[in-house]
Image (cartoon, rainbow, N blue to C red):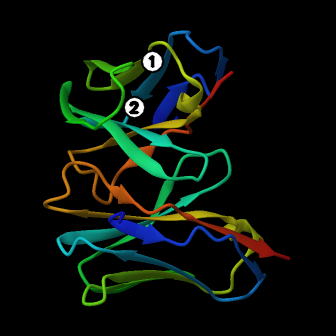
């Protein structure tokens, strides 16, 4: 079992919809939870991160972490066609070495 | 100015060849990484250097050899290329090891072995 699991999709939604992207994990030592966005043929770019449990909001994006369930979410409100990309969750904790642990990424398509 | 730049962006080569991918970062970061992204988009760490010292050396074939001439550069040399090496290779950097919250990725090198 991989440490970080993420449904690869694809997920297709109409413009304006609320999108929910999720990851589960098995390593209870993870403390930092990141969401990266990767456009086609580009490198991943950090969208936002959360430390430990709780919510974090940035514009149309909200990240949630539930450490008790080992479950994280990214919500996108009022989704736009420009949000079409692959979204990768990544995690790190003191016992996970020097590298981030990535999920497989969820491919999102927002149709006009 | 590109923060993390890789060359080449595309690389098509025959099986058995030796090739190199170069990476440079102008962020003043101490730590650099090589990741491999397979056809299913899974990003897997290969190597990491911190201030020219190897700190991550995952289980990859020893045909892959990283080299860091200085902390702003991390190159990847691949010997005797195989079909299974076809993937996108990403270089990344962070201020310190772990790259938590601050890892910057290059645009990737799409390697196709034929």
- Point out the residue furthest to the right here: A112
Q: Which image quarter holds the C terminus of chain B?
A: top right
B90 relative to B61, above or below: below
On screen, residue B28 versus residue A105, left or right, reads left
Q: Nearer the viewer, mark 2 or mark 1?
A: 1
Percent position (x, y) of residue A90? 38, 63
A105 relative to A9, above or below: above
SS at badge 2: strand
A68 relative to B109, above or below: below
Q: Quadrant of residue B56?
A: top left
The residue indicated by pointer 2 is B25
Residue displayed at 22% across by 71% down: A31
- Point out the residue furthest to the left here: A94
Are the residues under marks 2 and 1 on the same chain?
yes
On screen, residue A72 versus residue A53, left or right, reads right
- Point out the residue furthest to the top here: B17
SS at badge 1: strand
Camera-nearest residue between A61 and B55: B55
On screen, residue A17 versus residue B109, left or right, reads right
Percent position (x, y) of residue B87? 57, 36
Q: CB of mark 2 within 8 Å of CB of mark 1?
A: no
Neighbours of disc 1 within 10 Å: few (<14), some (14-19), many (20+): many
Neighbours of disc 2 within 10 Å: few (<14), some (14-19), many (20+): many
Residue displayed at 56% across by 52% down: B41
Cα–Cα span, label 2 and label 1: 21 Å
Chain letter of disc 2 in the image: B
The residue indicated by pointer 1 is B78
Q: Earlier in the sequence, mark 2 or mark 1?
A: 2
Q: Quadrant of residue A71?
A: bottom left
Chain letter of disc 1 in the image: B
Residue displayed at 26% across by 62% down: A92
């Amino acid at each position: 079992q991989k440490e970080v699991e993420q449904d690869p999709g694809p997920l297709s939604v109409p413009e304006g919809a609320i999108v929910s992207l999720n990851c589960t994990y098995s390593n209870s030592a993870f403390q930092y939870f990141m969401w990266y966005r990767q456009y086609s043929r580009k490198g991943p770019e950090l969208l936002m991160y959360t430390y430990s449990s709780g919510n974090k909001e940035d514009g149309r994006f909200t990240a949630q972490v539930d450490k008790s369930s080992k479950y994280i979410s990214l919500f996108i409100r009022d989704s736009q066609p420009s949000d079409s990309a692959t979204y990768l969750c990544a995690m790190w904790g003191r016992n996970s070495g020097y590298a981030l642990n990535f999920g497989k990424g969820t491919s999102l398509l927002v149709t006009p | 100015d590109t923060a993390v730049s890789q060359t080449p962006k595309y690389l098509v080569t025959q099986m058995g060849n030796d090739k190199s991918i170069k990476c440079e970062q102008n962020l003043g970061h101490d730590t650099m990484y090589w990741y491999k992204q397979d056809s299913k988009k899974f990003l897997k760490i290969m190597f990491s250097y911190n201030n020219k010292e190897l700190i991550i050396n995952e289980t990859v074939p020893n045909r892959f050899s990283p080299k860091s001439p200085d902390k702003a550069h991390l190159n990847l040399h691949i010997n005797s290329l195989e079909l299974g090496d076809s993937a996108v290779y990403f270089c990344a950097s962070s201020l310190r090891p772990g790259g938590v919250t601050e890892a910057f990725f290059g645009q990737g090198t799409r390697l196709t072995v034929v």
